[in-house]
Amino acid sequence: MKNTYQLPEGIAGNLENFRQVINQYKTGSLPYPQFRAIHVPFGIYDERQPGNFMLRIRLPAGLILPHQMRTVAAVSEKYGDGIPHITTRQDIQIHKVTLDNMGPALSELLQAGLSTKGGGGNTVRNITTCPHAGVCRNEVFDTTPYATALTEFLLTSPDSFDLPRKFKIAFSGCPHDCAGATIHDVGFIAKKQNGKGGFRVYAGGGLGAGKRIADILEDFIPAEDFHRSAQAVKKIFHKHGERNNKNRARLRFLVERIGLDQFRKLYQIELAELPKLPLQIHQTACHKSSSPCLNESFLPDFELWKKRNTNPQKQPDFYIVQIPLPLGDIPGTTLLALADVVENHGEGSVRATAHQNLLLRWVRENELPTLHKKLSKLALTDVRPCPYRDIVTCTGASTCRLGICLSRGLAQAITNKLSDLNLALHETNINIHISGCPNSCGRHPIAAIGIMGAARKIGRHLVPHYILHFGGTIREGKTQFASGNHALPAKNIPDFLAEFLEAFTHSSHYPAFHAFLDADGRQVIDHLAEKFKTVPDFTQNKDFYCDWGSTTQFSLAERR
């Protein structure tokens, strides 16, 4: 059975060794700190609920096949909470796995060609691409096979799992930079020079503390040299990165510390020592469905669904279909049924996106009515505009030990508030990203509206707050981080956003969001922030002292 990429030969042996580690921990012969140091690079994280773990399955380029979808669904149902979760890194996570179920779950995933190794810790993380790669009208060429080939190449190297800190790589096919190459440790953007395909290489970018836009490391490298470039940067990081101070250990801090010129010198030294052997690139194979479906009747909301959830490919008569997933979640039973749909429509696979949805590509136009009916039966045809249905959020304090706030609860509250108002935002590209803490897993620094969890003490009590950022955007040469520092109580965020977006919709002079922001929007933000910053006394309204989705008083006691 085919897989999306070739796992390293030693992965089965690694899993068997890991099973022994689990047994040693269970019997008490291995202390918890040592167990954690092993299971985190294996893509396994402790959750807040004692005894529960999260398994993060890497999906290079976000690709997953129907038989793998069935396995993820089955493993999640059998060993987890039954709700697989798509991440902003195009991974898929299984939550609430117990220690006893960890080994069996990993074994079943491995049999389907899936692995969690490198899904966490100080490793080369999942390598991402634009989910439209191969079908986008703007792209220079399809970057998918380069992402999967680089995954296979780097996973065989031991130092890929022994880095000073996490190491993230992305590929974009054009200057629109949908994959965010300009904010990664290493980013590749497809280019052509004298008719030859290659990449512009970026290095030293990243979100979170000390966020930084990447520098151009190479203006152009031939496509056959891309893996050497990635390997050279990784070797610099392995040799010279900070290993004592975790908070200053990402590659961007090394670039800042030694300067870009010195970093380039080290890069050239490492590059010269690497063998000039090209990687074998396997071009993406596409199954183009030939179902005629010419006489299929239309459901009432078909045209609206087609408008909001499909886009024409560069290949005539074929469409990209978005499958929206609320908060990135899809029940295992739904994922299982969706696998049958994917097997019979499009290219025979789906792609996870950084917006926590799935994409089905290579769907013929005359198939769309049939596909719409099938997806409708699975409740996967949300036609609300993006600001209402497509809020990006990390898992937050509901499961993550680093989370401060319940970001998913806030996302639901915002969705409910905006949906009730039904503001005229249908044709805008406003995106709302929420992170439950400063670590930026919700990618709030690059959002039009970015929201970051925080805590503030009011009197003797902690109150969940969020710091608001506005104006983030990704595009080669124009990438900028969102800015702002207003901290508002969590319970006021939905009302604040409702009034702010209402002001935007009434501003006919500035139909584009960023233009409105640059003209009058910041003043509107300042005015509304003053209005919504007040927290009532604990004796007057205890609700402000609870987070969204919780009835218990807000606390940081469980944060690690």
Image (tube, helix red, strand yellow):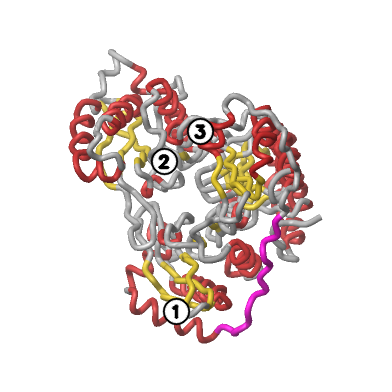
Q: Amino acid at mark 1?
A: Tyr
Compared with residue 52, is residue 126 higher up or lower down, i.e. above or below? below
Disc 2 crowd rating (10 Å Cα; few below 14, some 14-19, many 20+) is: many
Please give the label number shown on residue 398: 3
CA gap, disc 2 and disc 3: 17 Å
Which quarter of the rendering shows the N terminus?
bottom right
Please give the label number shown on residue 433: 2
Which of pointers 2 and 3 lies earlier in the amino acid sequence?
3
Q: Which residue is mark 1?
A: 267
Question: Is residue 462 among what the camera can see?
Answer: no
Residue located at (62% from left, 35% from top): 330
Q: Which residues are magenta?
A: 274-286
CA gap, disc 3 and disc 1: 41 Å
Q: Secondary structure at mark 1?
A: helix
Which of pointers 2 and 1 lies earlier in the amino acid sequence?
1
Disc 3 crowd rating (10 Å Cα; few below 14, some 14-19, many 20+) is: many
